[in-house]
Image (spheres, helix red, strand yellow):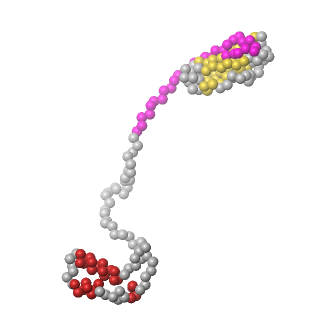
């Protein structure tokens, strides 16, 4: 809360400043000002409010005027250092590997069949499908998507159903867009 302006208080402050600066040659003026009655200016001291003194914010503060340096208004000043260049390692493109597929054959009905692929790009997904000698696509357990290992290989194993017709079927593998197909012979 601001203290309201008081002429008596202002006189006391001025006198104190004058005394401190060594300008106290008029002692009578000092004593008469400090001994003045508090109600000398009754209209100013009798009205005490909590309203702060308004400040004229529309008037700009005085500031030293400087003339701009030629071109300085047009040239923005950087606020931080520019980012440093980061070296990017070159990308190595490996030649397309030659995909090879091996399938166990012949396989008896009710026995395990196996297939393996070599030469796939490491980390790619490899899918397998087995088409029976009668032309139907098998849904046997083990015919799932695998990921080619770091050496580019993947392998599968599944059971040939006991009711599968004997004959020649096919196994197809797709690794990252490269495909290979091999024959598989089913015996009774």
Picture coordinates of residue 81 (x, y %)?
Answer: 38, 46
Picture coordinates of residue 13 (x, y %)?
Answer: 30, 78
Corner quadrant of residue 5: bottom left
Image quadrant holding the N terminus, namely: bottom left
**Towards the viewer: 87 or 34:** 34
- Which residues are the magenta region? 85-114
Corner quadrant of residue 174: top right
Q: Residue at x 38, y 53 (%)?
A: 76
Q: How many marks?
A: 0
Please state if 20 lies on the left or on the right of 136 as rendered. left
Q: As displayed, is residue 142 above or below residue 28?
A: above
User: In the rendered image, is residue 2 in sight?
Assistant: yes
Please state if 131 lies on the left or on the right of 124 as rendered. right
Q: As displayed, is residue 87 above or below residue 40?
A: above
Please state if 117 lies on the left or on the right of 133 as rendered. left
Picture coordinates of residue 14 (x, y %)?
Answer: 28, 79
- Is residue 99 inside the magenta stretch? yes
Image quadrant holding the C terminus, namely: top right
User: Most prominent secondary structure in the magenta stretch?
Assistant: loop
Q: Residue at x 63, y 25 (%)?
A: 146
Q: Residue at x 31, y 66 (%)?
A: 64
Q: As displayed, is residue 136 above or below residue 106?
A: below
- Is residue 66 inside the magenta stretch? no
Picture coordinates of residue 41 (x, y %)?
Answer: 36, 88
User: In the rendered image, is residue 99 in sight?
Assistant: no
Q: Residue at x 67, y 16 (%)?
A: 114
**Towards the viewer: 6 or 181:** 6
Q: As displayed, is residue 125 above or below residue 74?
A: above
**Towards the viewer: 66 or 118:** 118
Corner quadrant of residue 22: bottom left
């Amino acid at each position: 809360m601001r203290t309201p302006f008081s002429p008596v208080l202002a006189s006391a402050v001025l006198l104190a400043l004058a005394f401190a600066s060594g300008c106290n040659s008029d002692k009578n003026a000092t004593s008469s000002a400090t001994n003045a009655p508090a109600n000398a200016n009754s209209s100013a001291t009798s009205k005490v409010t909590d309203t702060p003194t308004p400040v004229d914010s529309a008037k700009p503060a005085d500031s030293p005027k400087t003339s701009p340096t030629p071109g300085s208004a047009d040239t923005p000043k950087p606020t931080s250092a520019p980012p440093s260049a980061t070296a990017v390692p070159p990308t190595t493109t490996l030649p397309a590997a030659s995909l090879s597929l091996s399938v166990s054959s012949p396989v008896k009905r009710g026995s395990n069949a196996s297939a393996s692929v070599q030469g796939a790009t490491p980390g790619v997904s490899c899918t397998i499908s087995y088409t029976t000698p009668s032309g139907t696509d098998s849904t046997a357990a083990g015919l799932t998507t695998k990921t080619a290992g770091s050496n580019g290989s993947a392998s599968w194993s599944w059971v040939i159903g006991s009711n599968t017709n004997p004959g020649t079927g096919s196994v197809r593998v797709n690794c990252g867009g490269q495909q290979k197909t091999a024959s598989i012979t089913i015996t009774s």
